[in-house]
Image (spheres, coloured by chain):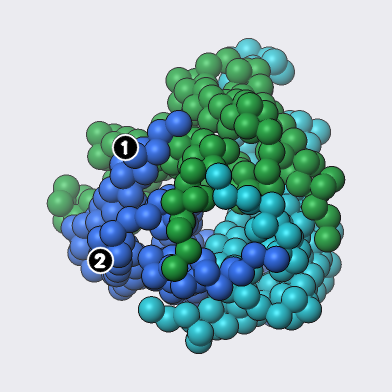
Chain colours: A blue, B cyan, C green
Amino acid sequence: MVDLTELMENEVFMAFTSYTTIILSKMMLMSTATAFYRLTRKVFANPEDCAGFGKGENAKKYLRTDDRVERVRRAHLNDLENIVPFLGIGLLYSLSGPDLSTAILHFRLFVGARIYHTIAYLTPLPQPNRALAFFVGYGVTFSMAYRLLKSRLY
Amino acid sequence: MVDLTELMENEVFMAFTSYTTIILSKMMLMSTATAFYRLTRKVFANPEDCAGFGKGENAKKYLRTDDRVERVRRAHLNDLENIVPFLGIGLLYSLSGPDLSTAILHFRLFVGARIYHTIAYLTPLPQPNRALAFFVGYGVTFSMAYRLLKSRLY
Amino acid sequence: MVDLTELMENEVFMAFTSYTTIILSKMMLMSTATAFYRLTRKVFANPEDCAGFGKGENAKKYLRTDDRVERVRRAHLNDLENIVPFLGIGLLYSLSGPDLSTAILHFRLFVGARIYHTIAYLTPLPQPNRALAFFVGYGVTFSMAYRLLKSRLY
């Protein structure tokens, strides 16, 4: 059996592991935020979810959309759209032997930008706070993709 | 060239491979379920999709939303939101050298919970069936993330 | 420390890296396409995004949905739903030691099909252009999943 601890002794890969775990955990908290707003504001998407609040017509009034809930859901979807490319490109980039400090700079910028993006989206902060956070994360991912394609194109 | 069969001889990684392939295949079947309901209920999102059912104004009546189709789409999006973190965190967790039986317990619980979540969402079963299935999968992913961060934080 | 360049000398893995980076970069461009249509058509989802166009009631008229923007968003979500399984299954497939030419055929077909899918969705081309592109990508992913499960089921 291969000694996988070898892979985990690679410092770039270890850094990637830590930052990816942090940003994926943050993304999962968006589900909790959605559930929190749905329950406190009594806004549901499925009839079975609000069955406890009343029967028949009385329950139907909870099947609506709410600005606050939709905002969290858009932030969550935006996370998905940006963290999935980071996950794929970042993993391959980590395995391509980049310079340690450059790699860590990429990971830190991405994680910081996405956390700031969520804060800017949920507060909400005036633009261009959210747009800037988005473009920093976007740029970091493209920078890693550029390095991969420049050196590895098959 | 490195002998990659070594990686595939690692039992935790092999188990991760099997369970991930199963749960990603299940997620892909949600696309088929959406297509099935769209075709049998004649509910479409794009004008070009229902061009075969009639011309002009006659076709526009098929551009609508339907409870059943929206339910499948919500289940699919919920799958995405939960399987993406499992994919990233689970891969890194598999490479971090966990105990085989603990790892398999995590993978089996997650796959079982997500399959039950889909059944509970599409039937639909009364709450808290779906909520419990969601939280089991959620807890499993956080448990793996916790182990990673505890031992690997850079 | 393990010499990770060994992994990058594996030709199947190098091919997977290149094609994955290409298709994830393409998916990220969908965000830019959404932003482009939102700005040129002045269609926004958040009040803070159109604050520059006017105050109070004047700004609210920009908070609407638009066919063109919704079309790009559906194409983006469809990308996510199909590229996430490709990312997970394709990575594990690349590590399972497949035949090089078979693997490259899979990757090329998938990348080509998804690019054609986006063209067919955004133009829009009449059906079944988009449906065929979808099923080619879908079939490629299932073909890789089948090979994994046949040989690796734990």
> Is residue C135 positioned above or below A90 on the image?
above
Of helix, strand and loop, which one carries label 2? Answer: helix
Instruction: Identify the residue position indicated by label 1 in the image.
Output: A150
Horizontal side, residue B78 vs residue A70: left or right: right
From this viewpoint, which residue is outermost toward the top? B55
Is C115 in front, or is A2? A2
Which numbered dot is residue A101? 2
Q: Is residue C131 visible?
A: no
Q: Quadrant of residue B135?
A: bottom right
Horizontal side, residue B58 vs residue C64: left or right: right
Horizontal side, residue B27 vs residue A93: left or right: right
Q: Residue at x 60, y 64 (%)?
A: B91
> Is residue A136 positioned above or below A118 on the image?
above
> Is residue C95 positioned above or below A45 on the image?
above
Counting every numbered tag in the picture gives 2
Rendered-image quadrant of the C terminus of chain C: bottom right
First of labels 1, 2 by sequence position: 2
Q: Residue at x 63, y 51 (%)?
A: B4
From this viewpoint, which residue is outermost toward the front? B1
Horizontal side, residue C132 vs residue B145: left or right: right
Of helix, strand and loop, which one carries label 1? Answer: helix
